[in-house]
Image: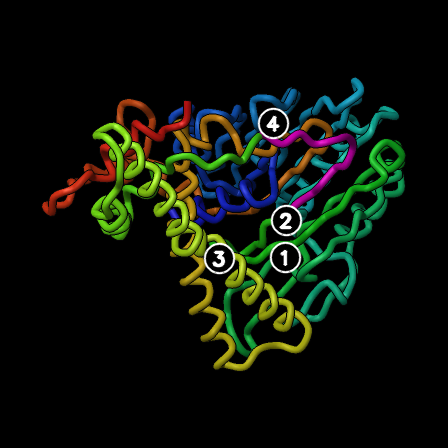
Amino acid sequence: MKSRSYLRRLIRERNVTVVALMETKAVEFSRKDANWLLGGGWDFEAHPSEGLSAGFLILWRKEVELVVSGASSHTMACTIKTSHDGRLNCYFVYGPRCHHRRRIIWEDVRSFGGSNEPLLVAGDFNLILAPEEKQGGRRFLYGKDQQDFADIMQELQLVDLGFSGNRFTWSNGKQGGARILERLDRALMNSAGLIAFPNCSVQHLSRLGSDHCPWLVKVEGGDQWQQSSRLLFDSVWLDFPQSFQVVEKAWRRNAKGDSMEIVMTKFKRSIWALRRWSRQEVGNIVDRNKVLEQDIDELQNRESSDGLSDEEHMQLGVLVAAFHRGCVLEEQWWWQRAKVHWAQLGIALLLCGTLTVILWTLPTILDVLSSSFLNGNGEIATWNHCLRSPRSPGLSVRRLAPVFAAE
């Protein structure tokens, strides 16, 4: 649940259009599971794991033209149509540790990327290429796996896109001298891709909910169109007991005029009082999460360079726990924010020419998939609260909802 809340927050905050999850360890993945994970506005393709190993899942917004051409427990090949009738071939990888199986994947990459079309090869390759990509553990040795990787890069003219953020993407989760940090994940693009998409960028995000950090690949190209952000009645207000007190206080104030004018005046007072209260209280959920995420990033970046003391490790754990709680609250806020759930419609910003892909080696996110979380409409049953009106006299928030609901 924590990983799902974090993933959904990343999608909202970063305007993600394609999600690739590696090492899912999921034997099967259905439409109901996709609805639970991200909502009905996403298509998906999944390949089952091999027992408790590997497994691949890719999800994309329904407005994105994406065609999957091949899949295995360690790879996913697809083509994405971009603006101006362009194409981007994507090959997502979760690298096996076996040398023989690695070479099979390299042969697949050769056959898939043999044309002169733009090609993106990205994922968790499960190997490092240089000593500076590792901290702690055994000394780095350049072996046959590293040489094969360098050969395929040279043959297909693949260039490492680099990154911003934490220089390590994986941690063994231990502390002190036993802690190991490595850069196992990377994104590569061929020369045709660099010409077609010169402003590509990769960003390593905070490592939460997995031993790998999620990371973004942004492929620029085109304008963005933004829908109206007009705020009407927010159904999430119903889940905050304080909202009843806000309405009651506003409703009790005297108003002049005939009966209808009095009612309309009190309606307007109540909705404006709720909006002011929402900006101060509910809106702070998003702001608090942003501050927590910045603090976590700062500590993890310091960890990758100078290391952390035991006290700082404890502080990092407290921040991560607080951030997870905040993600759940923020998800609830967005889920109920409008008349139609954001997960069904997509976020307000519709990307026309910019493709944003998030990749995450996340072995825990699919472990909690269960139909018990879903009701008959595919909604999260635990969030469909049955709120009671306050016992005190006056107009309840529930009765205000249909009056100010979005048309």
How far apart, in angstroms, are the residues tagged by discs 4 and 1?
A: 24 Å
Residue nearer the viewer, 55 or 102: 55
As drawn, 130 above or below 159:
below
Q: Secondary structure at mark 3?
A: helix
Q: Which residues are magenta?
A: 216-227
Closer to the chain start, of discs 4 and 3, is 4
| Numbered tag placed on residue 289 in the rendering | 3
Residue 4, given in percent of the width and then of the height, sits at 44, 44
Amino acid type of disc 1? Thr
Based on the picture, tell me whether residue 222 belongs to the magenta stretch: yes
Q: Secondary structure at mark 2?
A: strand
Q: State the residue position of label 4.
A: 71
Q: CA distance from mark 1 to mark 2?
A: 8 Å
Write down the quadrant of residue 212 in the picture. Answer: bottom right
Nearer to the camera, 72 or 160: 160
Left/right of residue 347 with respect to residue 383 in the rendered view: right
